[in-house]
Image: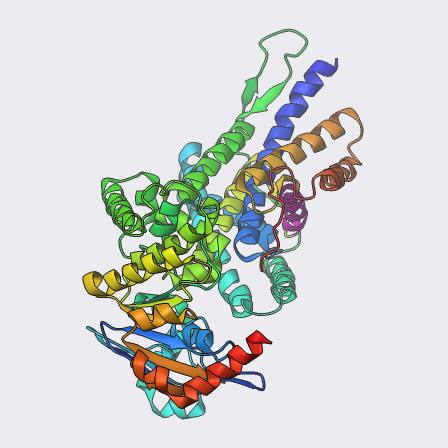
Amino acid sequence: MLTVRELCMRFGGVMALNRVGFDVAAGSVTALIGPNGAGKTTVFNCITGFYKASSGQIRLRGQTGEIDLIAILGEPLHVGDAWQPGKLAHKIYYKMFGGAHLATRAGVVRTFQNVRLFKEMTAMENLLVAQRHRVDWRPLSGLVQSRRFRRAEAAAVERGWYWLDFFGLGEDGNRLAGELPYGRQRRLEMARAMCVEPRLLCLDEPAAGLNPRETRELSGLIRQLRDRHGVTVCLIEHDMGLVMEISDHVVVLDHGQVIATGTPREVGEDPLVLEAYLGISGEEAA
Amino acid sequence: MTGHIFAQQAVNGLVLGSVYGLIAVGYTMVYGIIGMINFAHGEIYMIAAYLTAIFLAGLTLLGLQSPPLAILLVLAATIACTALYGWSVERIAYRPLRHANRLAPLISAIGISLILQNYVRLSQGARTQGIPSILDGGFHLFASGPDAFVRLTHAQLLIVVTAIISMFLLHFFIARTAMGRACRAVQQDRVMASLLGVNTDRVIAIVFVLGAGMAAVAGVLVTLNYGSFDFFIGFVAGIKAFTAAVLGGIGSLPGAMLGGVVLGLAESFFSGFVNTDYKDVFAFSLLVLVLIFKPSGLLGVPEVEKV
């Protein structure tokens, strides 16, 4: 479903990603692992339009055809484009109206390692912001609370409750997001991501800071998302237990390059991976 | 003796304060959402004054006689035009600098302010211009007694009532519509909002349009009340409204309105009881005092450093 090819990301002189390429199959759970600083989060940032990749391709296939996730951020214009009016028009359009929100609308949504909720809004309002396709945007109908506006709003609230219940947050709908305990904030962030109705859900270290029981619950939830809601999941995780348990496919990054891909078992036996990890764990022990 | 001066100055201060509040809303909203001071905002108010005169002349030429209808039409047309100005200023001068250093849009704003001032001076002339008064008359607040000369004119009443209605409309927009909710979300975390599919560029444009619309309301009403204007009125009005926004706590909508009213009342009482020449000195001293004891303004929340 997602194809990444030759993805490079430079920050000044630093090559954060060097020709990264991997695939995410539809309906799978794909884990991105690697030692700290390997570039996992950078890959995520490029996929979700948070960063603009220096070069390479990120394509998302869907019912409506293929979407180029780099082009929608707006590419620089070249002189050569003048010969291809169609391509030029496309580039100018995305330069004017493009942005990260288009990646989301194409069906990619992410969560953050450090939770980023709208802290001064209630949990439910957080979920409503994410449902842009469902609510009535016209300012006037909101001001007079027209019937269509209220119906759209009620549908969105109902959907919001569904995901709150799904993530076990049924009692927190009307509490301010910033007041919730940490574990619940994490789940609220996932609930909010699901409200966008993504086809590809990117989770950045979903188990960070959770205790073993919460981590077990989380792996159950992720599996349910894939099996019952048809969401493809791509996650970054350091908790190897969780990775081995839920992922179908593992991509290992080190120093901005893919060093291995395969099933959890294959990757676990790969000598390159063992070397990268043992080096790091040696440092950690020191 | 002082009782009726007090009453009259309270009326005048309230009117002045409503105007400051209406303009201050534009500063506070823009600051809240992208953290910059839109120094060109006062010019939008000045342009609204000119547009009022132009539209009013046009309507008179078309033979429209009824003042209430004329005011409504002028208000609607001016809001529409200034909204376009607000949108264009954002699109041309600020959006290309969205990811630049914080100082860059500030300088750009000062530039736009100068451009708008001089564009009006060149196209409309530098002289003070005026419109005939179309809203005469008023009430005496007290039927008889020594306070009987305390007066509230129809134009003043219109200013206060319209300001209150506009503020309520704005409040409902922010609190109850989907776009308002998106505005609040963008204010709290712009990047996250865009990652949830909210078109943040459009939300920011909407905020500029709303701010310009509120400034237009102020511009139309003040012009109808005082009748005279020149190309430079935007500067003083802008500085005062900015002061009001800071006084009330920049970033807070009720704060902007409260700051405006406090500033208006302070100025008006000072000129009524002490000295007219030093009313600005008093207003700014008040600002300094408030900021010493409450640096975030009257209704502002102390800033938490974002990581």
Q: Nearer the viewer, residue A117 or B133?
A: A117
Q: Residue at x 31, y 81 (%)?
A: A265
In the rendered view, would you say B162 is above or below A149? above
Q: In the shown orientation, is residue A265 left or right of residue A48?
A: left
Q: Residue at x 60, y 43 (%)?
A: B301
Q: Quick check: is B245 in the magenta stretch?
A: yes
Q: In the shown orientation, is residue A36 left or right of residue A220?
A: right
Give the quadrant of residue A283: bottom right
Q: What secondary structure is the magenta-colored segment mainly?
A: helix
Residue that protrudes farthest toward the top in the picture: B145
Q: In the shown orientation, is residue A228 left or right of residue B204?
A: left
Q: Nearer the viewer, residue B198 or A82?
A: B198
- The spot of residue B136 in percent (x, y) is 53, 27
- The spot of residue A77 in percent (x, y) is 44, 84
Q: Quadrant of the N terminus of chain B?
A: top right
Q: Quick check: is A185 in the magenta stretch?
A: no
Give the residues drawn in magenta, as a range. Answer: B232-246
- The spot of residue A168 in percent (x, y) is 31, 48
- The spot of residue A244 in percent (x, y) is 33, 73
The answer to whether residue A164 shows anywhere in this view is yes
Q: Nearer the viewer, residue A4 or B297?
A: A4
The answer to whether residue A77 shows anywhere in this view is no
Q: Quadrant of the C terminus of chain B?
A: bottom right
Q: Residue at x 35, y 71 (%)?
A: A243
Q: Number of numbered discs present?
A: 0
In the rendered view, would you say B162 is above or below A263? above
